[in-house]
Amino acid sequence: MFVDEITFSAPSALDGMSVHQLVASCPPLDTNSVYCNLLQASHFSDTSVMATSKDAQLLGFVSGYIIPNKVDTLFVWQVAVGDKARGQGLAKKMVSSLLERSRCLSVRYIETSITASNEGSWALFRRLAEQLGAPLEESVMFDKQTHFNGLHDTEYLVRIGPFHSN
């Protein structure tokens, strides 16, 4: 499968179950309820993207939203890439395609949260920062003990920007 054969589009509620199945097939991602994925695919469709093959198979999904009190900041909630499409830079292309949408033209920062052990996500967001020519800062967002009672690893806030949209 070649990335030039992939279509990027906004999801709809009809895609929620497929998104749920894709995320479940992508450990270490946290699986949310199907209802949550339905909301991501419908309420947040302007700031989420799905990547599909020519035969309409869901290969990747990025959910995100504009932070209400930071209208210049896109928070990338989750990035999922299926086995067939890994290693081709699809995740970076999906996030880049979001930044080209009219809803994201005023975005100057990207934020996300990543656990220390998620090397794939760290590599993705470092590559994005480099591509955007913007600094990457990290800090604790949700602490393992304080916020998760020791049941989940610390989530680090990653902030890229400022940058200029295309």
Image: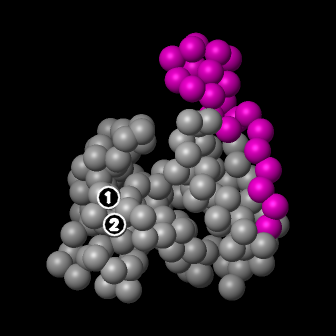
Is residue 35 found inside the magenta-colored segment of the image?
no
- Residue 23 percent coordinates (x, y): 34, 48
Residue type indicated by callout 2: Ala
Q: Residues within 10 Å of mark 2 (few under 14, many from 20)?
A: many
Q: Which residues are magenta?
A: 134-156
Report whether residue 75 is seen. no
- Residue 103 percent coordinates (x, y): 59, 75
Residue type indicated by callout 1: Gly
Q: How is the image coloured?
A: one colour
Q: Label 1's element? A: loop
Quadrant in the picture for residue 15: bottom left
- Residue 166 percent coordinates (x, y): 69, 85
Marks 2/1: CA–CA distance: 6 Å
Q: Considering depth in this image, is 38 or 136 the residue closer to the camera?
A: 136
Question: Residue drawn at (35%, 47%), measured in percent from left and top?
Answer: 26
Q: Considering depth in this image, is 112 or 88 the residue closer to the camera?
A: 88
Q: Is residue 132 above or below residue 124?
A: below
Query: Would you name the residue on which mark 2 appears?
Result: 85
Q: Is residue 80 left or right of residue 114?
A: left
Q: Is residue 139 above or below residue 12?
A: above
Query: Would you name the residue on which mark 1 appears?
Result: 82
Is residue 146 found inside the magenta-colored segment of the image?
yes
Furthest-left residue in view?
Answer: 55
Location of the N terminus (image quadrant): bottom left
SS assignment for the magenta stretch, majority: loop
- Residue 34 percent coordinates (x, y): 29, 44
Q: Is residue 157 above or below residue 55?
A: above
Q: Are marks 2 and 1 in contact (CB under 8 Å)?
A: yes
